[in-house]
Image: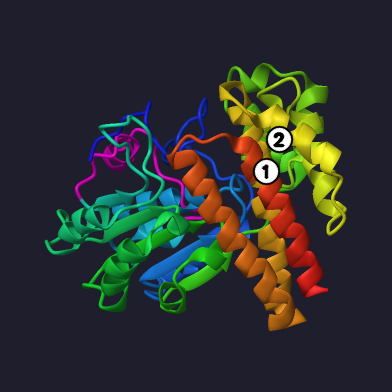
Amino acid sequence: MSADTEDEADRLEGTPHPRQARRLIGHAAVERDLLDAYRANKLPHAIIFGGPAGIGKATLAWRLARFILANPDPNAPAVRDARDFAVVPDSKVASQIASLSHPDVSLLRREVNDKTKRFYTEIRADDVRKTIQLFQRAASAGGYRIGIVDSAEDLNRSSANALLKLIEEPPPKSLFLLVAHRPGLILPTIRSRSRFIRLGALTPSEVDAVVGSLGPPWSEQTHDDRAKAAAQAHGSVHGALRLLGGSKGIELDALVQRLLRNLPNVDWTQVHRLADQIAGRDGEAGFDIAMTAIYDWLDQAVHDGAAGQGPRRLAPYAEAWDKVAANARETEALNLDKRPLILTIFSDLAAAVRAAA
């Protein structure tokens, strides 16, 4: 597999791909735990890295894959003495990972539709079949074969079931790393057969550090703008970059957050204002900001329900999540007007809050 840096569904536009990151900012404790597990030959065969987009899940997944491929013997001195998953940047494995040319790595993500030149809205079963081929042959260097999924909630039912068969009966020295921004959407049987690691949000200072490391144009933002975006990004680098990407990003995010906080009461005048701002081609960035905030809000509501508030509170939010995701996919796939989508979403969210009360 080769890399096309212009068409990558798992890369935020205008930023390097996570596989190219040389540092992991935050999540040091998780990294140490995984390193200890690898040394002890107790690394799970499937790991789900869950949490909001832009907190380093994919960076950690690629970092783990790169380290294991560069150090296939967990008993080697280099592994024993390692303090983290850092690998020499100009090593052969690092270069192969960066160019997506390593023969023992398969990446599952939404691909480009050759007819429409747009990304498919889902990871298809045909994409999973290509990954299966990797696990049907021996590793090139006798080490691990690694499948990375970014992101797991993009799997449709057919592709999820195809992947499940691999995870249920993994060949020797197989590792599946699943990135999940919305873990609640993962097929339950996949989740039950994987180790789930929820990564926490980054601190504002960590978000600012990542943004500053990305180079121009992000590092050229004023200190005040970067600090304000980091403070309002809810621990997500993607959130900060979206806020910095347009002159009204921070204000639009504040509007969405205010509308979500007031649920089940809906200020329809402000909802219409939001819908108008994200309509049309010039509103793509605003649409991303709004949908990220909405999905994060739903993710927290579902997480709170699963954490002990009972199925009565959980079910309305789960149902709303399914409806929002389905309507959003249809709107994007058919390139429909986003105004009706926003109005429908807030009507559904208000109904979910009332039903869960």
Tell me the element at label 1: helix
Which residue is under mark 2? 275
In the image, is residue 335 part of the stretch drawn in magenta?
no
**Label 2: which secondary element:** helix
Does 229 sit above or below residue 67? above
Q: Quadrant of the N terminus?
A: top left
Query: Is 89 covered by the magenta stretch?
Result: yes
Disc 2 residue crowd, few under 14, some 14–19, many 20+, Cα 10 Å: many
User: Dot 1: few (<14), some (14–19), or many (≥20) neighbours within 10 Å?
Assistant: many
Mark with earlier residue (2, 1): 2
At horizontal 65% and vertical 28% (from top left) the residue drawn is 212
Q: Position of 204 compared to 166: left or right?
A: right
Q: Which mark is residue 342?
A: 1
- Residue 184 is situated, as x and y percent measured from the top left of the image, at 56, 67
Colouring of the image: rainbow
Q: Nearer the viewer, residue 295 or 56?
A: 295
Quadrant where the C terminus is found in the figure:
bottom right
Q: Is residue 65 left or right of residue 241?
A: left
- Given the image, on which type of amino acid does mark 2 rest? Ala
Q: Position of residue 10 (x, y in %)?
A: 44, 41
Quarter of the image where one finds residue 171:
bottom left
* Kind of residue at badge 1: Ile
User: How many badges with numbers are in the image?
Assistant: 2
Give yes or no for contact between labels 2 and 1 (Cβ–Cβ under 8 Å).
yes
The quarter of the picture where residue 258 lies is top right
Magenta segment, prevailing SS (helix, strand or loop): loop
**Looking at the image, can residue 288 be seen?**
yes
Q: Which residues are magenta?
A: 82-103
